[in-house]
Image (cartoon, rainbow, N blue to C red):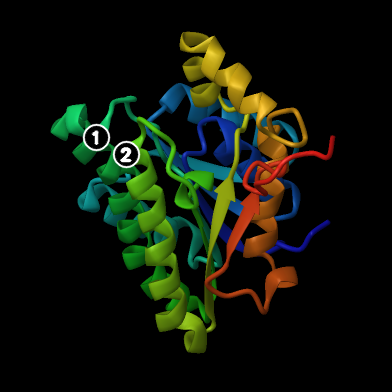
Amino acid sequence: MDEFAGKVVLVTGAGSGIGREAALLFAERGAHVFAADLNEAGLAETLERIVRAGGRASVRRTDVSDESEVAALLAHVEREGGRLDAAFNNAGVTGGTHRVEEYPVEDFDRVLGINLRSIFLGIKHEVPLMLRSGGGAICNTASVAALTGPGGMSAYAASKHGVHGLTRVAAMENAARNIRVNTLAPGFTETPMVVANGSQNPAFAANATAAIPAKRAAHPREVAEAAVWLCSDRASYVYGHMLVVDGGMTIGGFEPA
Protein backbone atom coordinates (compact mmCIF):
# COMPACT_ATOMS: atom_id res chain seq x y z
CA MET A 1 0.00 0.00 0.00
CA ASP A 2 1.25 3.46 -0.85
CA GLU A 3 -1.66 5.63 0.28
CA PHE A 4 0.74 8.04 2.03
CA ALA A 5 3.26 8.25 -0.80
CA GLY A 6 4.62 11.80 -1.05
CA LYS A 7 2.98 12.78 2.22
CA VAL A 8 4.55 14.03 5.44
CA VAL A 9 3.28 12.64 8.74
CA LEU A 10 4.10 13.60 12.33
CA VAL A 11 3.81 11.05 15.15
CA THR A 12 4.40 11.93 18.81
CA GLY A 13 5.07 9.29 21.43
CA ALA A 14 6.80 7.38 18.63
CA GLY A 15 9.50 5.84 20.80
CA SER A 16 7.40 2.83 21.79
CA GLY A 17 3.98 1.23 21.82
CA ILE A 18 1.13 2.54 19.67
CA GLY A 19 3.17 5.52 18.47
CA ARG A 20 6.02 3.35 17.23
CA GLU A 21 3.66 0.97 15.43
CA ALA A 22 1.87 3.91 13.80
CA ALA A 23 5.18 5.41 12.66
CA LEU A 24 6.13 2.05 11.13
CA LEU A 25 2.77 1.73 9.37
CA PHE A 26 2.84 5.28 7.97
CA ALA A 27 6.36 4.67 6.67
CA GLU A 28 5.40 1.29 5.17
CA ARG A 29 2.66 3.08 3.27
CA GLY A 30 4.94 5.67 1.78
CA ALA A 31 5.03 8.59 4.20
CA HIS A 32 8.04 10.59 5.29
CA VAL A 33 7.56 10.18 9.02
CA PHE A 34 8.67 12.70 11.61
CA ALA A 35 8.81 10.90 14.95
CA ALA A 36 8.96 12.70 18.29
CA ASP A 37 9.34 11.50 21.86
CA LEU A 38 11.31 12.18 25.04
CA ASN A 39 12.68 8.64 24.81
CA GLU A 40 15.73 9.09 22.59
CA ALA A 41 16.73 5.41 22.75
CA GLY A 42 13.23 4.41 21.72
CA LEU A 43 13.24 6.94 18.88
CA ALA A 44 16.55 5.55 17.64
CA GLU A 45 15.06 2.05 17.52
CA THR A 46 11.96 3.31 15.71
CA LEU A 47 14.16 5.06 13.16
CA GLU A 48 16.33 1.99 12.68
CA ARG A 49 13.30 -0.22 12.06
CA ILE A 50 11.81 2.21 9.53
CA VAL A 51 15.08 2.60 7.63
CA ARG A 52 15.74 -1.14 7.69
CA ALA A 53 12.33 -1.68 6.07
CA GLY A 54 13.15 0.84 3.35
CA GLY A 55 11.14 3.73 4.75
CA ARG A 56 11.98 7.36 5.38
CA ALA A 57 11.92 9.01 8.78
CA SER A 58 13.39 11.76 10.91
CA VAL A 59 13.40 11.77 14.72
CA ARG A 60 13.53 14.59 17.24
CA ARG A 61 13.52 14.56 21.03
CA THR A 62 10.58 16.72 22.08
CA ASP A 63 8.77 17.60 25.30
CA VAL A 64 5.26 17.88 23.89
CA SER A 65 4.04 19.79 26.95
CA ASP A 66 6.47 22.66 26.22
CA GLU A 67 5.21 25.09 23.58
CA SER A 68 8.65 26.23 22.52
CA GLU A 69 9.65 22.63 21.83
CA VAL A 70 6.44 21.88 19.93
CA ALA A 71 6.90 25.03 17.85
CA ALA A 72 10.50 23.99 17.12
CA LEU A 73 9.31 20.50 16.15
CA LEU A 74 6.81 21.87 13.62
CA ALA A 75 9.41 24.30 12.28
CA HIS A 76 11.69 21.29 11.80
CA VAL A 77 8.92 19.41 9.96
CA GLU A 78 8.32 22.38 7.67
CA ARG A 79 12.02 22.91 7.03
CA GLU A 80 12.83 19.26 6.33
CA GLY A 81 9.52 17.98 4.96
CA GLY A 82 8.11 21.11 3.37
CA ARG A 83 4.53 20.33 4.39
CA LEU A 84 2.36 18.41 6.86
CA ASP A 85 -0.40 16.09 5.71
CA ALA A 86 -1.22 14.15 8.87
CA ALA A 87 -0.44 14.24 12.56
CA PHE A 88 -0.94 11.57 15.20
CA ASN A 89 -0.78 13.31 18.59
CA ASN A 90 -0.23 10.25 20.70
CA ALA A 91 2.22 10.99 23.56
CA GLY A 92 0.81 10.35 27.02
CA VAL A 93 1.28 9.01 30.55
CA THR A 94 -1.02 7.33 33.06
CA GLY A 95 0.12 9.09 36.23
CA GLY A 96 -0.27 7.70 39.69
CA THR A 97 -3.28 5.93 41.21
CA HIS A 98 -4.89 7.81 44.11
CA ARG A 99 -8.35 8.68 45.33
CA VAL A 100 -9.33 12.20 44.28
CA GLU A 101 -8.91 13.63 47.79
CA GLU A 102 -5.42 12.13 47.99
CA TYR A 103 -4.22 12.93 44.46
CA PRO A 104 -1.00 15.01 44.52
CA VAL A 105 -1.56 18.31 42.74
CA GLU A 106 1.87 18.18 41.13
CA ASP A 107 1.12 14.78 39.59
CA PHE A 108 -2.30 15.94 38.43
CA ASP A 109 -0.77 18.96 36.69
CA ARG A 110 1.95 16.82 35.09
CA VAL A 111 -0.56 14.33 33.66
CA LEU A 112 -2.76 17.08 32.23
CA GLY A 113 0.31 18.81 30.82
CA ILE A 114 1.50 15.74 28.94
CA ASN A 115 -1.87 14.29 27.97
CA LEU A 116 -4.03 17.35 27.33
CA ARG A 117 -1.93 20.49 27.01
CA SER A 118 0.24 18.66 24.48
CA ILE A 119 -2.80 17.97 22.28
CA PHE A 120 -3.73 21.64 22.39
CA LEU A 121 -0.17 22.65 21.50
CA GLY A 122 0.02 20.07 18.75
CA ILE A 123 -3.19 21.22 17.08
CA LYS A 124 -2.23 24.88 17.53
CA HIS A 125 1.02 24.46 15.63
CA GLU A 126 -0.03 21.73 13.18
CA VAL A 127 -3.07 23.48 11.72
CA PRO A 128 -1.18 26.48 10.22
CA LEU A 129 1.29 24.16 8.47
CA MET A 130 -1.51 21.94 7.19
CA LEU A 131 -3.35 24.97 5.83
CA ARG A 132 -0.26 25.95 3.88
CA SER A 133 -0.21 22.42 2.47
CA GLY A 134 -3.87 22.49 1.45
CA GLY A 135 -5.34 20.53 4.36
CA GLY A 136 -4.76 17.31 6.25
CA ALA A 137 -5.87 15.05 9.07
CA ILE A 138 -5.18 14.99 12.80
CA CYS A 139 -5.72 12.04 15.13
CA ASN A 140 -5.51 12.60 18.89
CA THR A 141 -5.06 9.72 21.31
CA ALA A 142 -7.53 9.63 24.18
CA SER A 143 -8.54 6.36 25.87
CA VAL A 144 -11.57 4.39 26.95
CA ALA A 145 -11.05 6.52 30.08
CA ALA A 146 -12.61 9.31 28.01
CA LEU A 147 -15.86 7.34 28.31
CA THR A 148 -15.55 5.84 31.79
CA GLY A 149 -14.44 6.80 35.30
CA PRO A 150 -11.63 4.44 36.31
CA GLY A 151 -11.21 4.69 40.07
CA GLY A 152 -7.91 6.14 41.20
CA MET A 153 -7.15 7.73 37.84
CA SER A 154 -8.75 11.16 38.09
CA ALA A 155 -5.97 13.01 36.30
CA TYR A 156 -5.79 10.47 33.49
CA ALA A 157 -9.57 10.36 32.99
CA ALA A 158 -9.88 14.15 33.13
CA SER A 159 -7.11 14.55 30.56
CA LYS A 160 -8.59 12.00 28.19
CA HIS A 161 -12.10 13.44 28.44
CA GLY A 162 -10.48 16.77 27.63
CA VAL A 163 -8.71 15.37 24.58
CA HIS A 164 -12.03 14.55 22.92
CA GLY A 165 -13.42 17.96 23.81
CA LEU A 166 -10.46 19.61 22.11
CA THR A 167 -10.87 17.28 19.14
CA ARG A 168 -14.49 18.24 18.65
CA VAL A 169 -13.75 21.96 18.82
CA ALA A 170 -10.84 21.64 16.38
CA ALA A 171 -12.97 19.48 14.07
CA MET A 172 -15.72 22.10 14.01
CA GLU A 173 -13.29 24.96 13.42
CA ASN A 174 -11.39 23.25 10.61
CA ALA A 175 -13.88 21.06 8.75
CA ALA A 176 -14.50 23.68 6.06
CA ARG A 177 -10.75 24.22 5.73
CA ASN A 178 -10.09 20.63 4.59
CA ILE A 179 -8.62 19.50 7.91
CA ARG A 180 -10.23 16.53 9.63
CA VAL A 181 -9.68 16.04 13.37
CA ASN A 182 -10.65 12.85 15.19
CA THR A 183 -9.99 10.99 18.43
CA LEU A 184 -8.66 7.48 18.93
CA ALA A 185 -9.75 5.78 22.16
CA PRO A 186 -7.68 2.64 22.82
CA GLY A 187 -8.60 0.11 25.45
CA PHE A 188 -6.20 -2.11 27.38
CA THR A 189 -3.16 -2.33 25.09
CA GLU A 190 0.15 -4.14 25.60
CA THR A 191 2.35 -1.04 25.47
CA PRO A 192 5.52 -0.82 27.59
CA MET A 193 3.74 1.66 29.88
CA VAL A 194 0.79 -0.68 30.46
CA VAL A 195 3.01 -3.75 30.87
CA ALA A 196 5.10 -1.91 33.47
CA ASN A 197 2.00 -0.82 35.37
CA GLY A 198 0.62 -4.36 35.18
CA SER A 199 3.80 -5.85 36.62
CA GLN A 200 3.42 -3.54 39.61
CA ASN A 201 -0.23 -4.50 40.04
CA PRO A 202 -0.83 -8.00 38.58
CA ALA A 203 -4.31 -8.24 40.11
CA PHE A 204 -5.40 -5.09 38.28
CA ALA A 205 -4.02 -6.39 34.98
CA ALA A 206 -5.77 -9.73 35.45
CA ASN A 207 -9.08 -8.08 36.33
CA ALA A 208 -8.81 -5.66 33.39
CA THR A 209 -8.22 -8.49 30.94
CA ALA A 210 -11.05 -10.55 32.39
CA ALA A 211 -13.42 -7.60 31.92
CA ILE A 212 -12.70 -7.42 28.17
CA PRO A 213 -15.16 -9.50 26.08
CA ALA A 214 -12.27 -10.43 23.75
CA LYS A 215 -10.42 -11.77 26.83
CA ARG A 216 -7.11 -10.26 25.80
CA ALA A 217 -5.33 -6.96 25.54
CA ALA A 218 -4.73 -5.33 22.18
CA HIS A 219 -1.42 -5.44 20.37
CA PRO A 220 -0.19 -1.87 19.73
CA ARG A 221 -0.28 -2.48 15.97
CA GLU A 222 -4.00 -3.24 16.08
CA VAL A 223 -4.64 0.15 17.62
CA ALA A 224 -2.15 1.91 15.34
CA GLU A 225 -4.03 0.60 12.30
CA ALA A 226 -7.06 2.58 13.45
CA ALA A 227 -5.01 5.76 13.83
CA VAL A 228 -3.56 5.35 10.35
CA TRP A 229 -7.04 4.79 8.93
CA LEU A 230 -8.35 7.97 10.58
CA CYS A 231 -5.49 9.90 8.97
CA SER A 232 -6.06 8.36 5.53
CA ASP A 233 -8.34 9.34 2.66
CA ARG A 234 -10.38 6.23 3.46
CA ALA A 235 -11.78 8.20 6.41
CA SER A 236 -12.49 11.26 4.25
CA TYR A 237 -15.96 11.92 5.72
CA VAL A 238 -15.11 11.27 9.38
CA TYR A 239 -15.02 14.46 11.47
CA GLY A 240 -14.92 14.93 15.25
CA HIS A 241 -15.44 11.23 15.88
CA MET A 242 -14.10 9.12 18.73
CA LEU A 243 -13.07 5.71 17.40
CA VAL A 244 -13.04 3.19 20.25
CA VAL A 245 -10.69 0.22 19.80
CA ASP A 246 -11.06 -1.80 22.98
CA GLY A 247 -11.98 -5.45 22.35
CA GLY A 248 -15.48 -4.67 23.57
CA MET A 249 -14.34 -3.31 26.93
CA THR A 250 -16.92 -0.51 26.97
CA ILE A 251 -19.86 -2.51 25.61
CA GLY A 252 -21.29 -3.03 29.09
CA GLY A 253 -23.72 -5.78 30.03
CA PHE A 254 -22.70 -9.43 30.43
CA GLU A 255 -22.58 -12.70 28.57
CA PRO A 256 -25.69 -14.90 28.58
CA ALA A 257 -25.78 -17.69 31.11
Residue 254 in which image quadrant: top right
Tell me the quarter of the image containing the N terminus. bottom right
Dot 2 and dot 1 residues touching (CB under 8 Å): yes
Residue 220, image x and y in percent? 66, 35
Q: Which residue is mark 2?
A: 154
Q: Secondary structure at mark 1?
A: helix
| Residue assigned mark 1 | 100
- The location of residue 231, given as percent across then percent down, is 62, 63
Q: Name the mark on residue 63.
A: none
Few, some or many C-alpha atoms within 10 Å of disc 2 (few <14, some 14-19, many ≥20)? many
The type of residue carrying mark 1 is Val
Compared with 219, 23 (above or below) is below
Which quadrant of the structure image shows residue 51? top right
Determine whether the residue tagged by mark 2 lies in a helix, strand or loop.
helix
Residue displayed at 64% across by 62% down: 230
Q: Is residue 95 above or below residue 196?
A: below
Q: Position of residue 141 (x, y in %)?
A: 50, 50
Amino acid at dot 2:
Ser
- Quadrant in the rendering for residue 5: bottom right
Q: How many marks?
A: 2
**Which residue is outermost to the bottom?**
176
Q: Position of residue 23 (x, y in %)?
A: 61, 44
In the image, 133 versus 179, the foreground residue is 179
